[in-house]
């Protein structure tokens, strides 16, 4: 939220300079994001009137102007602004002045014509970004008066970063209460007496949206001058708050929103038909909005309507057809209260973010509509004229929130803050914040105003004391007492250990959004059980991910598009799956790799990453579980996103734990990726479980190695061979090593040869050659029986 520093100082006396004010606001939780000084160093700038303007004899785009600066004789100024013309009053930087940009004004010749000063735009004066032409002042601006004095300069535009729990400070009057508490001052009352009712015109109102819109006020004002120009003080306050003045009536509704924090809207009353109806939209109901966009609504929206059509989206934006124009003579002014839940996310659904929705979805004081109505009426009658009719009030009192007093105890305040805050100081703080304070035996009973949605329990009140008293005044103490350390179970690896292992193998950790596009999940074929979001950030982030791989591959694709040829990423996170109730969250680890198997170097021939590189990474992870025998891979029952000839299913104890391999060519093409993208995704819990480490004696007896080569069908996997050998030899086999694979000349078609080393060792004795030969015979027999193998000579 932006606001004018001078405007704030008019609402509350601040005995501090700008730097102290900014520091106090930030330290109280109202973070100041930016301070923009306005109109500093304008001592030599005065109000002037152009009394003559003729074309420059040597330049088509320049004019030679005679300017009355209140000094008797007019000054000659050469000016190139497109809006320079006779009769307008504009700022004049006189000779000797120095403008905020460092421009020094001197007498000069422009194309042979003398010029004694410079007529200025708002940007040149440092009060606005508009450089399209001269800053035009009201026709009654006093000629010769210092511009700074006339416009209330210097000033500053201060921008705050307001947290969602403090909607009360989205209006200057609410912010003034915080400032008054910080500086020991009082908020000055804003004159909002009831406007005189001098007309009888009114329009009935019906509430049909239930608790979503429990209060609505409306008033007809007849005979307004919609072409009236906002006075300088109002237009400047809007401009310094980041809002461009448009017309008097629109500007007044914006001004009241900034001053009190309550959004308002004005309709052209002559375009309305019958009573005003506050209701939910019909399915597919159309409405053309003020910005010209076409909205298609649904029953989740609250609309302001008449008998014929919807006029506005409640709490978001008005409609184009009922807007106030220069031809408007009678207006219907509204001030409504909407429940935050009825407005939350509705603007995003329409691709909008408005000042009104920003306030309503956080919560607007339900007591403000009456006050805002009278304040806006007062300003309209004073600036645009007209006659005000009676205020029509429609409300559902049972749906309006009641603020319950909250007890704050002396002892609890002292215990939480660790310091003693004087009782008089506590009472002063809450009184300055606009809260009701009643002293009781053990503390205070505090009644928050209707604007403070964030005050619900004792801790909320303690926070108010802390931030106003000053966080920097609360000493820092080291906690006393013993801190219990959580023991990590030895039978489980930590997620950090898993991350360390992947990082050690050359992968970079990525953190991707849990939200993805529904179309992306459909492209992957993993859209079953997806969890849609009620209020998505955008259409591309509309569902929760059911797998980590789509988002991680998108990150890889973005890297590839930025000339990163070798990409290796991993992520440890959760996937989400619809179950009918709360979604299931499943921990997963995912890996993606593309490009070279090794970084580019001179000592090794470059090659592209393949299935076996990823399988090696899997084996490294499995090794840390201490139970590699429980893990296996097979090529059956692969998901549609994996290459059928270069993918595998990962099993633990025969149960599916994940997948790895190359992306399916069709998917890689759809994602605009090459054929070298390899992925792996595993369930987190199985890969984190490990066998409890145990010590064993160093073997007393030597090991024996026997090498064998067997011929067997091509389709028989190494996992099946290893399982057969281990099953036949038992504990005597300490290790099996595959060191050769051959297919070709001398081997029947459809068969292959595997050569392996068997490491045999007995814990109780030395194995003899006969013992070793017998074990080899057992292994060959098992392979012949289960794998259709035969021993090669």
Image (cartoon, grey):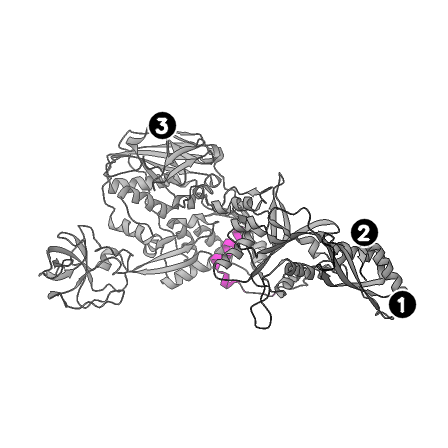
Q: How many discs appear?
A: 3
Segment tinted magenta in the rendering: 460-478
Upstream in sequence: badge 3 or badge 1: 3
Residue visible at 11% across and 62% down in the picture: 58
Query: Was residue 475 drawn as part of the magenta stretch in this picture?
Result: yes
Q: Residues within 10 Å of mark 1 (few under 14, many from 20)?
A: few
Tell me the tag on residue 361: none
Residue visible at 39% across and 39% down in the picture: 369
Q: Position of residue 196 (x, y in %)?
A: 28, 36
Judged left or right of residue 41, residue 763 is right
Q: CA distance from mark 3 to mark 2?
A: 82 Å
Upstream in sequence: badge 1 or badge 2: 1
Q: Position of residue 137 (x, y in %)?
A: 20, 53
Q: Are marks 1 and 2 in contact (CB under 8 Å)?
A: no
Judged left or right of residue 611, residue 122 is left
Judged left or right of residue 638, residue 223 is left
Q: Which residue is nearer to you in this view: 465 or 392?
A: 392
Query: Was residue 429 drawn as part of the magenta stretch in this picture?
Result: no
Q: Position of residue 395 (x, y in %)?
A: 43, 32
Would you name the residue on which mark 2 appears? Answer: 786
Tell me the tag on residue 308: 3
Q: Residues within 10 Å of mark 3 (few under 14, many from 20)?
A: few
């Amino acid at each position: 939220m932006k606001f004018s520093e001078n405007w704030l100082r008019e609402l509350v006396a601040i005995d501090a300079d700008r730097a102290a004010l900014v520091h106090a606001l930030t330290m109280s939780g109202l973070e100041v994001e930016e301070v923009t000084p306005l109109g500093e160093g304008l001592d030599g700038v005065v109000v002037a009137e152009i009394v003559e303007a003729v074309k420059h004899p040597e330049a088509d785009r320049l004019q030679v102007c005679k300017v009355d600066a209140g000094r008797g004789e007019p000054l000659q100024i050469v000016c190139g602004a497109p809006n320079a013309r006779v009769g307008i009053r504009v700022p004049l930087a006189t000779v000797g002045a120095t403008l905020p940009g460092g421009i020094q004004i001197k007498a000069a010749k422009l194309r042979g014509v003398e010029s004694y000063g410079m007529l200025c735009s708002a940007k040149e004066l440092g009060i606005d970004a508009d450089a399209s032409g001269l800053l035009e002042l009201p026709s009654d601006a006093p000629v010769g008066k210092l511009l700074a004095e006339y416009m209330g300069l210097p000033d500053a535009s201060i921008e705050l970063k307001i947290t969602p729990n403090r909607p009360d400070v989205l209006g200057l009057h609410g912010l003034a209460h915080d400032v008054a508490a910080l500086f020991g001052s009082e908020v000055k009352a804003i004159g909002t007496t009831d406007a005189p009712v001098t007309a009888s015109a009114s329009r009935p109102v019906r509430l049909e949206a239930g608790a979503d819109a429990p209060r609505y006020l409306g008033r007809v004002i007849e005979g307004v001058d919609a072409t009236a120009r906002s006075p300088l003080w109002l237009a400047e306050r809007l401009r310094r708050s980041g809002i461009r003045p448009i017309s008097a009536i629109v500007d007044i509704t914006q001004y009241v929103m900034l001053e009190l924090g309550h959004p308002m809207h004005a309709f052209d009353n002559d375009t309305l038909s019958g009573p005003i109806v506050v209701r939910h939209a019909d399915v597919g109901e159309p409405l053309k909005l003020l910005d010209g966009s076409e909205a298609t609504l649904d029953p989740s929206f609250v609309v302001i309507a008449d008998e014929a059509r919807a006029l506005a989206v409640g709490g978001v934006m008005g409609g184009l057809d009922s807007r106030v124009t220069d031809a408007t003579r009678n207006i219907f002014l509204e001030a409504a209260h909407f429940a935050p839940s009825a407005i939350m996310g509705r603007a995003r659904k329409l691709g909008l973010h408005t000042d009104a929705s920003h306030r309503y979805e956080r919560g607007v004081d339900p007591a403000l509509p009456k006050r805002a109505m009278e304040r806006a009426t007062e300003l309209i009658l004073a600036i645009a004229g007209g006659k005000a009719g009676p205020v029509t009030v429609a409300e559902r009192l049972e749906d309006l929130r009641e603020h319950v007093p909250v007890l704050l105890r002396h002892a609890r305040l002292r215990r939480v803050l660790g310091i003693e805050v004087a009782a008089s100081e506590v009472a002063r703080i809450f009184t300055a914040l606009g809260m009701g304070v009643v002293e009781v035996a053990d503390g205070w009973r505090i009644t928050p105003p209707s604007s403070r949605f964030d005050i619900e329990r004792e801790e909320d009140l303690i926070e108010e004391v802390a931030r106003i008293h000053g966080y920097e005044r609360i000493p820092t103490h080291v906690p006393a007492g013993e801190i219990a350390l959580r023991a990590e179970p030895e039978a489980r690896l930590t997620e950090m250990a898993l991350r360390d292992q992947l990082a050690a193998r050359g992968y970079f950790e990525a953190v991707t959004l849990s939200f993805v596009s529904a179309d992306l999940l459909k492209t992957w074929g993993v859209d079953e059980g997806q969890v849609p979001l009620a209020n998505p950030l955008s259409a591309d982030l509309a569902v929760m991910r059911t797998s980590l791989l789509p988002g991680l591959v998108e990150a890889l694709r973005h890297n590839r598009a930025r000339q990163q040829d070798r990409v290796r990423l991993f992520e440890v996170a959760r996937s989400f799956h619809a179950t009918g109730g709360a979604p299931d969250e499943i921990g997963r680890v995912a890996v993606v790799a593309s490009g070279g198997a090794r970084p580019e170097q001179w000592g090794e021939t470059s090659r592209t990453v393949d299935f076996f590189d990823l399988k090696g990474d899997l084996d490294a992870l499995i090794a840390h579980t201490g139970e590699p025998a429980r893990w296996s891979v097979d090529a059956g029952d692969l998901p549609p996103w994996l290459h059928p000839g270069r993918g595998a299913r990962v099993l633990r104890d025969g149960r599916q734990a994940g997948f790895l391999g190359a992306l399916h060519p069709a998917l890689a093409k759809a994602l605009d990726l090459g054929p070298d993208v390899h992925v792996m995704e595993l369930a987190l819990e199985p890969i984190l479980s490990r066998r409890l480490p145990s010590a064993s004696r160093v073997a007393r007896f030597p090991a024996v190695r026997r090498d064998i080569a067997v011929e067997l069908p091509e389709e028989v996997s190494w996992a099946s061979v290893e399982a057969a050998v281990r099953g036949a030899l038992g504990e005597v086999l300490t290790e099996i090593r595959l060191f050769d694979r051959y297919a070709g000349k001398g081997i029947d078609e459809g068969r292959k040869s595997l050569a392996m080393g068997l490491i045999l060792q007995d814990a109780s004795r030395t194995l003899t050659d006969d013992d070793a030969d017998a074990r080899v015979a057992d292994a060959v027999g098992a392979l012949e029986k289960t794998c259709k193998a035969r021993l090669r000579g």
